Amino acid sequence: MQTVKIPVSIDPIRAATSRLSYQGMISAKVLKRLNELCAGDCSDVAVSLECGVDLQGIVYLKGKAVTELTLLCQRCMTLFTTEVTVEFCFSPCRTQAEVDELPEAYDPIECNEIGEVRLHSMIEDELILAVPLVPSHDIAECHVGSNDMAVGEIEDAQQGRPNPFAVLEKLKSK
C-alpha cells in the first residue's frame, strides 16, 4: 500500500462498502488547533485508516494516528518532544437512536449535511484528547534539581493581623 495524503472528508458508507483503506500523512499545517496546544513544532501525522462493515452490518472507520509534539515540561519549564499515538474505531450516526443502539466497541461520529465525515477534524480531535493535561519529562530526564524544590513548613503570613471574622464570632456568642 502506498503512502498518500489522507482525504479531508469521505462518505463512510461508500468507503465501507468498497472496503477502502488509507495509509498516509496529514500535514501539521492543517491541524491548527493541535498546533496551538504545542509549545513548538508538531510533526506531520502518520495515519492508517480502514473502512468496513462488521458482521452486524455496522459501518466503521478504524485506524491509528501517530505524531510527535513539542511540549513544555511543567516541572522544569523546558521543551521536550513526545510521541502521541491514538487508536480509534468510529461508526457514523445520523440520529440519537442510532447512537443509543451502537455497541460499546464503537464511538459515534456525526456525519455532515451531505453524509460525509471530516477525517482531518476527527483525527485532530483524537490527538488533542491524547495530549497530556500536565506535560512533563520522565523523572530521569527532567532538568529540575533537588535545590529547585521547597520542602518544609510554610510561614503563616497573617501572624499579627486581626482575624476579620472575629466580629462575627462575637455576634454568634450573643
Image: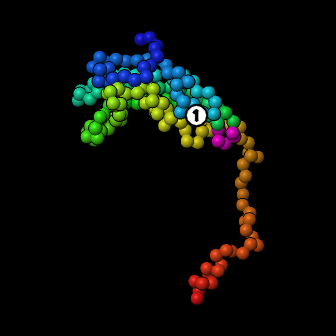
Q: Which residue was labeled with disc 1?
A: 36
Residue 117 sits above or below residue 104 on the image: above
Where residue 17 appears, as percent x and y from the top left, is: 27, 19
Determine the residue located farthest toward the left in the rendered image.
Answer: 56
Question: Camera-side residue: 51 or 149?
Answer: 51
Q: Tell me residue 91's x, y (percent).
A: 32, 31
Front residue (pair 96, 149): 96
Q: Magenta segment range? A: 73-77
> Dot 1: few (<14), some (14–19), or many (≥20) neighbours within 10 Å?
few
Q: What's the residue at 57%, 83% (across, down)?
A: 172
> Which residue occupies 46% across, 33% down?
126
On the image, which quarter does residue 162 sit in? bottom right
Q: In which quarter of the image is the C terminus?
A: bottom right
Note whether 79 is above or below 157 in the view shown. Answer: above
Task: Identify the secondary structure beneath mark 1.
Answer: helix
- Please say whether residue 61 is one of the residues in the magenta stretch: no
Q: Is residue 74 magenta?
A: yes
